[in-house]
Every structure is written in C-alpha cells, then in structure tokens.
Amino acid sequence: MSRLTIWLILGTTLTFLIGPFLIVIFAGASAGETLTFPPQGLSLKWYAKVFTVESFRDSFALSMFLAIFGTLTALLIGIPAAYALNRYNLPGAEAIRTIVAAPIIVPGIIVGLALLRYFVVPLDVTITMALFVTHTALVLPYAVRVVSSSLNNLRADMEEAAVILGCTRFQAFVKVVLPNIRGGILAAFILGFVTSFNEVPASLFLSGPGVRTLPIDMLSYMEITFDPSVAALSALLAFMSVAIVFVAERLLGFSRYV
C-alpha cells in the first residue's frame, strides 16, 4: 500500500470522526440568528448566551449531581461486587456478570420505559430519585468491569501476606487492595461520569417538567428555538468530555482500563 493511499485513508477517517465536531463548533460561532452551516459570519455571542439561559444552568446542575453522586454510588456497590467476583469462586459467577452488564447490553430506551412503568408509577417516587437510580444502574456495569480489570492485575498473594502478618480481611482490603487499584477506581469514576452526564435514552422517559438533565433540556429547547446556542453548548460539552478523558489518559493511562 502506497504512502499516498495510507494518508488518504487516514484523512478520510479523521474527517469522518472530527468533521461533525468541527461543524458544531463553527455553527455555534455563527453571527446569524438561526442554526446554519456554513455560519453567517463569526461571533461568540451564542457561546456567551449559553450561560444566561436559566434552564441550561438548572439542568447542568442536575446532570452534574447525577453524574457525580450516581457514579460514586455505583462505585460503592461495584467495588465490593467486583472484588467478590474476582477473588471468590462464586456459583453462577458468569451469570452474575451477564446480569450486571445488562444495562449496557439492553437499549437505554427499554431501561427507561421499564423503570417508568414498574418503579416510578407504582412507587410514586420523585423524578430526581428516579433519575438517580437510573443513572446509578447504567453506570454500575462500568464500575464492575473496570475495577475487575484492575483486580486481575493485582497479585492475590499480596493480600494473603497482609492477612498472615495480622490484618483482618477487611483491613487487608482497605490497606492493600484499595491503594493498589486506585487508578482503576478513578478510571471507573471518570468513565461513569462521562457516561452518566451524556446519557439520553433512559433520561428521556424519566424527565419531567422542571426536572430535566442537560441533554434532554437541549432537545426540548430545540423544539421551540432554532438559534445556534444549542450548537455552542454542544461544543462546550464536547470540549469538557474530551478534556476529562485527555487528563485521565495523561494521569492514569485511561486506555489500560477501558
């Protein structure tokens, strides 16, 4: 294969991957009053407007709450689950792993509809609580898988040595296991945060008046307004996600865990 062919294939791939991102960036920088591409002149006024829309601020706060605390809750459940699956010969371990991975395998629309029908309506829970449970459930498989990957790389005899030297199993877990898998835990948190923050299908069923995640609020905003502010907000969110993953890769070697 010639060098020219290689560069053409590489250029086509990069254009396919980065092209939509560049379109959104420039569409958000349009000086016009409607969302168009190519932009009608260049201006940052729509990027500035993003911060003045009250619904965007409220939904951003909700999305941050769900992403942070939903992921932390998933880790509180997922770390012990991953440890049990990794260190003990549990009956039906493969079936358990399949069940834990179900929120990834099953389309988010089905998850949202099921939770709405059999959790929200019968129990009459609040929208915020429903979203919190949903985002925790959707992030849990990532927590279990990433932490399991870290545990696979940790020698079990290190923990056994701590027990022989006088630690209880719990003390060995806290003093030996957790410090040695902290990179995997942080990687799981970042992956869960990005996944939760950008989640749409399940949140679409569970959001309600005045309580919407940012992606759902953006969809609702576009139903009544077609100005470039949504494109500007999309570009800012894309930059945020890329920056988080980039920093995680530089500090943790993020690609080792996912």
Image (tube, helix red, strand yellow):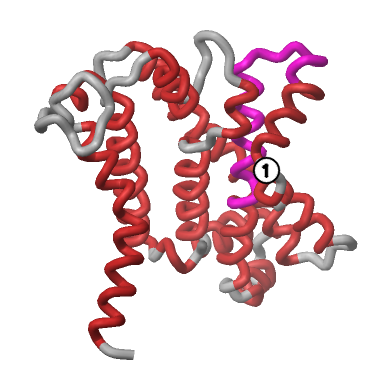
Query: x and y percent of residue 82 in the render?
Result: 68, 57
What segment is highlighted magenta in the picture?
120-142
Q: What amino acid type should be assigned to the residue bearing mark 1?
A: Pro
- Looking at this view, is 207 or 163 the one in front? 207
Does 72 sit left or right of 159 as displayed?
Answer: left
Query: x and y percent of residue 220 in the render?
Result: 46, 18
Quarter of the rendering containing residue 171: bottom right
Q: Could you say whether the residue bearing mark 1 is in a helix, strand or loop?
A: loop
- Looking at this view, is 155 or 250 the one in front? 250
Is 219 located above or below residue 174 in the figure? Answer: above
Does 258 sit left or right of 221 as displayed?
Answer: right
Quarter of the rendering containing residue 232: top left
Is 47 located above or below residue 170 in the figure? Answer: above
Task: Name the residue rendered at 71%, 65% in the picture.
Answer: 86
Q: Residue furthest bottom?
A: 1
Residue underneath mark 1? 107
